[in-house]
Amino acid sequence: MKVLVLNSGSSSQKSCLYEIGVTLPDDPPDCVWEGKVEWEGDRTEYSIKNNRGGAVRDLAAVASREEAIERLLQTLWRGKLQTISLPSEIDVVGHRVVHGGPHHFEPAFVNAEVKSAIENVSVFAPLHNRAELQGMEIVAKMLGPVPQVAVFDTGFHRTMPLAAATYPGPYEWFEQGIRRYGFHGINHQYCAQRAVQLLRAHPDSSRIVSCHLGNGCSLAAIRDGRSVDTTMGFTPLEGLMMGTRSGSVDPGILTYLLRQKQLSAKQLDDLLNRKSGLLGISGISSDMREILAASRNGSEPEKQSRARLALEMYVHRLQSGIGAMSAVLGGLDVLIFTAGVGENSPEVRAAVCDKLAFLGIRLDETKNAQMLDEDRDIAAPDATVRVLVIRAQEDWMIARECWHLTRMRSTVSS
Ligand code: ADP
């Protein structure tokens, strides 16, 4: 089965093609083709590769987002990286949909009702949901009546108890859909399943805290495979300190800025989403690699102290968040690090784990320092908590959901 996955961002579009046989492999396979297009103004940058060693990087001027995505997808059946003969070879297309709102949690075939539900909650995540709907339109235009599947990033958190999902404002908020949804659910769910597989544990016997640390950062508390709490909330702004997002701040700061500084909602939105976090505090970058480098570089003391503060705050919030999630679980069996920072920064992992020794977390320093491209346990052999590094695999998780739904549908109809 050929499964195409589309993962839309506000200024990028990633896509990959998987070929899956009659059984799902234990380990995530490589994509047979993968491409990414990022745009700024009318300039777009393409990077595309296939599993036969072909790779292309290209800059182009395009008139619209739609045109950029069409060019990207056409490279599947045209040009140097051609991977299939005809678009009709694609059996199913999966989309990551950031927000499913209060009613849509399970992966679903896209139809008019699903599309209108995604549209209805696009006020909650305007940059994402509209981009994802546009992706569905483009696929329908280019590939015709191929089945399309929506996989919701909020879906995994549907099992959170009301006490975790409800904000302590007026009760009407909940009735209006103002509640904790949580995000990164596709990857948190994948990591929880992968942890059970790696540890050969029983799915119903673990208390897991999953730390997704990329440009956006969130924690999930997972008991017996189900999300019971998470740090992101109504929007992906709540919780941990992130690359450019603030994470949680006292809401009184916002009313102060609105009243006393006459900031508009748009200015506040921009401050909190794009000018805060690692970037806002360090004044250097949102990229953890640059923060770590500046925090070691004594030749510019002013920069160094701001970078150190940013790093200490990032670790402090992570430490208190993992503590809170462990308390919700009543203890901790497995801690997972995933996504850009989680997978690649031994320094951040060590800094936070050192502070959590009281929970039974202890790293094997050599294993933590190794830069390996494989999922692994980096805890000391006799530690009571396993610490896993797991590569984020949202696209593979989406492809798997498409495979399951498609097979279920063909079983039902045969
Ligand atoms: P996204 O959330 O956009 O999917 P990623 O999961 O790829 O992003 O994470 C991107 C972040 O990962 C970068 O901003 C960078 O801070 C961080 N990162 C990548 N490699 C390293 C590294 N070797 N050390 C520390 N941080 C890293």
Image: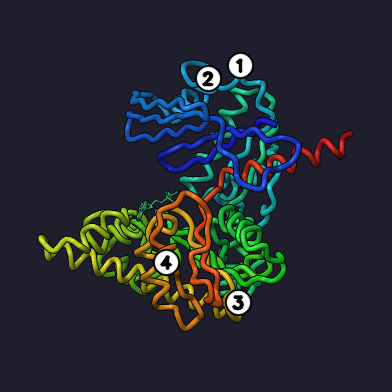
Q: Between disc 4 and disc 1, whose residue precedes?
A: 1
Residue hosting label 2: 82
- The span from disc 4 to disc 1 (Cα, nearest Å) is 45 Å
Q: As rendered, which of 40 and 334 lies closer to the eye?
A: 334
Tell me the number on the disc at residue 329.
3
- Using the image as rendered, state which of residue 203 and residue 165 is in the foreground: 203
Q: Earlier in the sequence, mark 2 or mark 4?
A: 2
What amino acid type should be assigned to the residue bearing mark 4? Leu
Distance between the Cα atoms at labels 4 and 3?
Answer: 19 Å
Front label number (4 vs 1): 1
Q: CA distance from mark 2 to mark 4?
A: 41 Å
Report the side of 133 relative to 288 (left or right). right
Q: What is the secondary structure assignment of the residue under circle 4? A: loop
Residue assigned mark 1: 85
Q: Is residue 414 visible?
A: yes
Q: CA distance from mark 2 to mark 1?
A: 8 Å
Q: Vertically, is 127 above or below 270?
A: above
